Amino acid sequence: MLKPDDDEPVVDPAVDLVPDEAEGGDEPMEASPDELAGGDSEEAVRRYRLPDPRNREMFAIADQLMGASKLRVMCEDGKSRMARIPGKMKRRMWIKPGDLVIVKPWDFQNAKADVKYRYVRTQAINLSRRKKIPELLDVGF
């Protein structure tokens, strides 16, 4: 910032100087709260991890906990599989019956799968509203 007795004016960092092209002046314009938040005022864009079909990932619903880091899941292709919860996910978040998860079936044994991701309830509701979940698994989160 410069001293007021210098030739250049003092600029307040909270006010944006945007020249108005229609009038050609340098009038200070304050940013609206929506612009400061960086989001759309109508609906904020939310990004969630979706299954990668190239990697054979698919949506599934946790049916039954079997113990020993295993659970029975109902996959979007209509098959029921035994899914394994990896150690890093087992320690980070718990999976309950009825949770929406992403699983990847094993290449050599199609009746088993690995859990790749678990959605929290609000994420599952949002995906259901946006019609991202197949009808077979969409149980009205």
Image: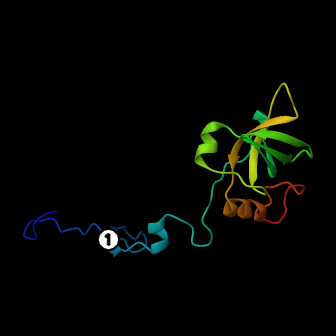
Q: Of 69 and 92, which appears nearest the observer? A: 69
> Which quadrant of the figure contains the C terminus?
bottom right
Left or right relative to 52: residue 47 = left
Give the farthest residue toward the front: 67
Pointer 1 local density, CA inside 10 Å: few below 14, some 14–19, many at least 20: few
Q: Residue at x 69, y 62 (%)?
A: 121
Q: Residue at x 73, y 64 (%)?
A: 125
Pinpoint residue 6: horizontal percent, then vertical percent.
9, 66
Q: Locate residue 95, reporting x and y percent.
A: 70, 51
Nearer to me, 41 or 64: 64
Count how many numbered circles sit on residues in the image: 1
- Viewed as shown, does residue 105 lie left or right of 25? right
| Residue drawn at x 68%, y 46% as measured from the top left | 117
SS for dot 1: loop
| Residue 66: % across, % down | 79, 45
Q: Which picture quadrant has residue 28? A: bottom left
Q: Residue furthest top?
A: 108
Depicted 1 relative to depicted 111: above or below:
below
Q: Specify the amino acid type for callout 1.
A: Val
Task: Return the x and y of residue 29 as percentages of the image width and height.
Answer: 37, 74
